[in-house]
Amino acid sequence: MGPIDKEAVQTVLNEFENQDLYLHLETTNGAYAAHRQESQLAVCAYIRNGRIRYHRGVVSGDGPFRVGLKMDQGWVYAEGLTDYEVDAEGRLLMAGHDREGRLAVALELSRTPFRI
C-alpha cells in the first residue's frame, strides 16, 4: 500500500459504479485503547463480503481522506483513509493508519468475495 492518490482512487471508484460488489469495511481502535488506558472503551465495526451496488463513489478531503458510496437507499462511507492499492485481483483496498502505523479503518471493494 502507498499513500492515497485521490485521482487514482476516484478513477477506480468510477469504474466500479453500478456493479454488484463485495464490501469489506472495518473500523477499530481495538485492543490498543483498552491496553493503554483501562477507562477507554475499545470499539470496532466489521462487515466482510457484504453485497453492495452504488451509483456514485466519491473520495474527498486533503488527507486523511473520506470515501463515500451512494446507494439507492443511503450511503456507506469511511473516514480517515490514508493508504490504498489496487491488487493483482483488481480489488480496491484502502486503509487508514494512526501515527504509530496501526490500522484504524479499512474499506475494500471487490468483484469477487474476499477470502474468509
Image (cartoon, rainbow, N blue to C red):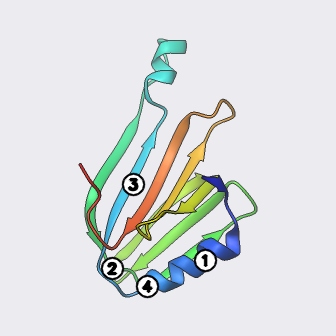
56 to the left or right of 72: right
The label on residue 17 is: 4
Which residue is denoted by mark 3 in the rendering? Answer: 25
Binning the other alpha carbons within 10 Å of mark 1 as few (below 14), some (14 to 19) or many (20 upward) gives: some
Circle 4 SS class: loop
For marks 2 and 3 on the same chain, the one whose residue lies earlier in the sequence: 3
Q: Position of residue 100 (x, y in %)?
A: 66, 29
Which residue is denoted by mark 2 in the rendering? Answer: 53
Residue 37 appears in the picture as rendered? no
Which residue is denoted by mark 1 in the rendering? Answer: 10
3D distance between C-alphas at marks 4 and 1 = 11 Å
| Of the pair 6 and 27, the residue shown nearer to us | 6
What residue is rendered at 59% in x and 81% in y? 11
Circle 3 SS class: strand
**Amino acid at circle 2:** Arg
**Amino acid at circle 4:** Glu
Q: Position of residue 50 (x, y in %)?
A: 26, 63
3D distance between C-alphas at marks 2 and 4 = 7 Å
Circle 1 SS class: helix
What residue is rendered at 66% in x and 54% in y? 2
Mark in front: 2 vs 1: 1
For marks 4 and 1 on the same chain, the one whose residue lies earlier in the sequence: 1
The picture quadrant where one finds residue 74 is bottom left
Binning the other alpha carbons within 10 Å of mark 2 as few (below 14), some (14 to 19) or many (20 upward) gives: some
For marks 1 and 3 on the same chain, the one whose residue lies earlier in the sequence: 1
